[in-house]
Image: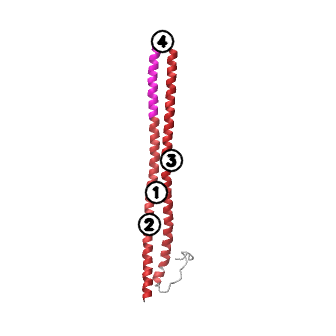
Amino acid sequence: MSASYPHNEQLPAVSGIPPILASQAQTIQGAYVNSGRMSEGLARLQSSRVMFQQAAKRNSSAAERTEGAISALLTAMQMDVRQRIMHSEARLSDELDGVKTRLRTEMAHNHQTIERHLQDTAKMVRSVMERTRDDAQCGLTDALEFLNICGLKLQEGINNTENDYMGSLAQILVSNAWTTAL
């Protein structure tokens, strides 16, 4: 097909081609143009899939960095609380023996309670971070699966169009050979 004939204009008749086959030239030309468009669409779809994969990697990396930063903050907070408790205990050692004993007991209990609270808080934060990372991964995984399905369906359509085009082209070649032989 020549690029100088838009697909909506009638091509000039080729001598010897039966009119029934000449009328199919428009169909073949349209199939050829659509095949090219579908190939371009498939390439763009595959580029989108790669971009989604890269975004998934970046999201996963950001979640890990955030989890590390939160863990470091919780550890620093835990150390600060421990230092404050130790400072309070040192100050109390100067108090009377009876008061000192009572306060040490309370401090030990408070220390255990704070430790439990800090550990529970750290567990909850880690759990939330894991769920957030899993939710982001699931969303991107679903999007990638959808893109893959679209790509497979588009590929199937392109293959069918190319098969139809090649079949029509073969019929035209046989017709040309037949008219030449006559």
As drawn, the label of residue 147 is 1
CA gap, disc 1 to disc 2?
A: 15 Å
Mark 4 belongs to which amino acid?
A: Val
**Residue position for label 4:** 99
Where residue 57 appears, as percent x and y from the top left, is 48, 48
Give the magenta range: 99-123
Question: Along the polypeptide, which appears first: circle 1 or circle 2?
Answer: 1
> Circles 1 and 2: CB distance less than 8 Å?
no
Q: Please, is residue 115 above or below residue 93 in the view?
A: below
As drawn, the label of residue 58 is 3
Q: Secondary structure at mark 3?
A: helix
Question: Along the polypeptide, which appears first: circle 4 or circle 3?
Answer: 3
Mark 3 belongs to which amino acid?
A: Arg
Mark 1 belongs to which amino acid?
A: Leu
**Residue position for label 2:** 157
Q: Quadrant of residue 157?
A: bottom left
Mark 2 belongs to which amino acid?
A: Gly
